Amino acid sequence: TFDPQVVRKHQTRWDGLDQQIIALYARGLTVRDIQAQLEEMYGVEVSAGLISEVTDEVLDEVKTWQNRPLENMYPVMFLDALMVKMRHEGRVENRAVYVAIGVDEEGRKDVLGLWSSANEGAKFWLGVMTELRNRGLRDVYIVCTDGLKGFPDAISSVFPKAQVQTCIVHMIRASLNYVGWKERKALAADLKPVYRAATAASAELALTAFRGRWPKHQVVADVWERNWERVIPFFQFPEEIRKVIYTTNAVESLHASLRKVTKNRGSFPSEEAAFKLLYLALRNASIKWSTLQFWKEAMRQFEMIYPGRREAGRAA
């Protein structure tokens, strides 16, 4: 008839242990690191099997999250990728994990999903866009990408009114990959007149001037010219909207958090294991998110540029 209170009948681990394991795992600690941390903090030995069992309980939550209904309108969507090593079909591959971040009508960021692919293309992106639509998304004003192959055609086929815009920060980053450390600061300063120009025509003149100033780095100007058709939509928008789609802090800060938790892993045994950790890291990162800066001004401009479209999206 005795009912113990400290360690209850049939209890195999104390209250709070699962949360501690998941919290440590979400910060990128390996199983061995978690074992050492728990032993140091609480003086208990925890098996690798128990840690796997506890973290695997998150998998159902991941599936529910990945398939949850979405808002019918996200005025701006950012799409970016990070490389993660994982085992696929018996061998370890460096696979791209794509993260879609939607900004809702109130300016709040929301990660819409995670997808993995070895070779992205039109067919892959068509599947992603169709999935988003099936989950309730009906319209997007602007989709910012890093120039992913096949994406513009896929987005247009599912969301024909959406404007695809190459991310300016990705363009700058791609440009600096061709330049030595000593010249990066000066070259980046000379690129500013290109992407901060008032119009597409003045941006083109600034790019020509850039070519003249950097004859040994013509490849940088070539990068901009190859992507020019996806860069120039940026110039049709007023300053309020440019500030939102230019700054990729929404993506960059998130990816910094994700890379931080994956860098300690040599590779993941499966895509499922990778997504489990990435989901937990996303959940932690999103707690600190706030409304995007300049959003109210951007929405006022969207209303003037796309009159009636917001209501039409809700009714679709």
Image: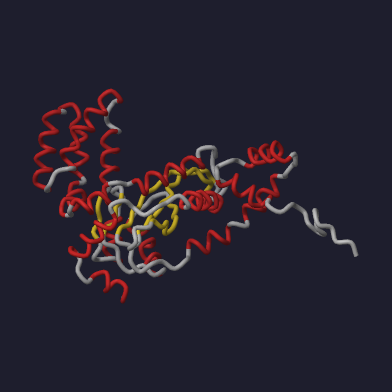
Quadrant hosting residue 137: bottom left
Q: Viewer-proximal residue, 166 or 190?
A: 190
Provide residue 241's location: percent of width, then percent of height.
23, 54
In the depicted structure, whether residue 64 falls above or below residue 210: below
Count of number-bearing discs:
0
Q: Residue at x 68, y 37 (%)?
A: 36
Q: Residue furthest bottom?
A: 315
In the depicted structure, whether residue 35 falls above or below residue 99: above
Q: Residue furthest top?
A: 182
Q: Quadrant of the N terminus?
A: bottom right
Provide residue 102's location: percent of width, then percent of height.
36, 58
Q: Viewer-proximal residue, 39 or 278?
A: 39
- Residue 230 horizontal side relative to residue 50, left or right: left
Tell me how the rendering is colored: secondary structure
Q: Quadrant of the C terminus?
A: bottom left
Provide residue 296's location: percent of width, then percent of height.
28, 58
Provide residue 294's location: percent of width, then percent of height.
28, 52
Q: Viewer-proximal residue, 215 or 314?
A: 314
Q: Viewer-proximal residue, 245 or 94?
A: 245
